[in-house]
Amino acid sequence: MDESTARLTEAAAYIRSRWPKTPDILIMAGTGLSDCTGFVSEEASLMYGEIPGFPLATVESHAGCLLCGDASGTPVMVMQGRFHLYEGYTAREVTFPIRVARALGARTLIVTNAAGGLNPTFKEGSLMVIRDHLNLTGENPLVGPNNDDWGLRFPSMIHAYNRDLSHAALETARNLHVPACRGVYAGLKGPSLETPAEMRWLRTIGADCVGFSTVMEVIAATHAGMSTLGLSLITNINDPDNPEEATVEKVLAVAEKARPGFEGVLKQVIGNR
């Protein structure tokens, strides 16, 4: 057994010792979105620091806690806080929790994030269902020797975002009167925000919103054979001709205001599976 597999096995065994159920879904809560999983009944709560091999969340607004429980009869795990490349973690470290969740039996990833809107038709506080992404980080969690037990050497990314889940999320949002749209997420490494020229270029190449997460996790989940639903909360609009400063405080404020609708969509999508 190689070192990576050993670390993965140890982490999975520890979580299973605290919560013996087999998770069906891993929910990854982005910046300001940890409270959007209030519908999950808590059965176990593990701090990242106690799970062998888990990185630590260093971003202030990320709790760094793995919540295990039940959502409408479905066993789920919720990551309240994620890891980013800009924190200094490698792509494989960022995606370690995806591997652990899959080893425990999870078949679906619901990944959420707070993102800056690039599409001029978008509004602050709206929900964007990710239909595709642009990996502009210069990183990939699959670089290096491939573990055939984890997935194919050259996984297709054509259907990285599950169409049925995406359609269900969009229809649910509309039924709940939550402003929603579909679009392309551009993943950058960060942590510096975009210049006006970069905003303009990102629009040109087809990006509808931009952020510093998500793409690494989705690549790893696709490699592992998981179905993925990606949801972006548009917390600000990036207008290259009239740029405004984006602050963490504003992102959190928009996320809090949008929380009821966002949570409602998550709850119904999971409950109707």
Image: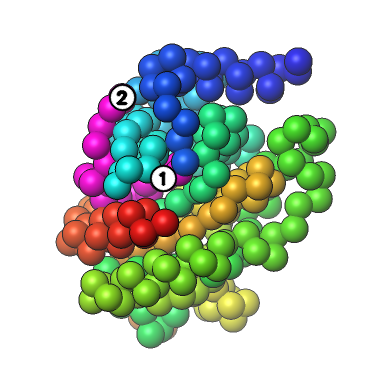
Closer-to-camera residue (91/173): 173
Q: Earlier in the sequence, mark 2 or mark 1?
A: 1
- Expressed as whole percent of the image width and height from the top left, the position of residue 12 reads 53, 22
Q: Amino acid at mark 2?
A: Ala
Residue located at (66% from left, 43% from top): 224
What are the residue bounds of the magenta stretch?
25-45
Q: Quadrant of the N terminus?
A: top right
**How many callouts does the rendering have?**
2
The stretch drawn in magenta includes residue 71: no
Q: Nearer the viewer, residue 83 or 241?
A: 83
Q: Is residue 170 left or right of residue 130?
A: left
Residue on which disc 2 sits: 44
- The answer, for residue 87, to whether it is visible in the render is no
Q: Is residue 152 above or below residue 88?
A: below
Callout 2 crowding tier (Cα within 10 Å): few <14, some 14–19, many ≥20:
some
Residue at 66% from the left image edge and 16% from the top image edge: 6
**Residue position marked by numbered label 1 in the rendering:** 27
The vertical placement of 63 against 34, above or below, is above
Residue 268 shows up from this direction: yes
Residue name at image x 38 percent, y 85 percent: 121
Image location of residue 7, percent across then percent down: 62, 18
The percent position of residue 151, horizontal first and vertical second, equals 74, 41
Query: Disc 1 marks which amino acid?
Result: Ile
Q: Secondary structure at mark 2?
A: strand
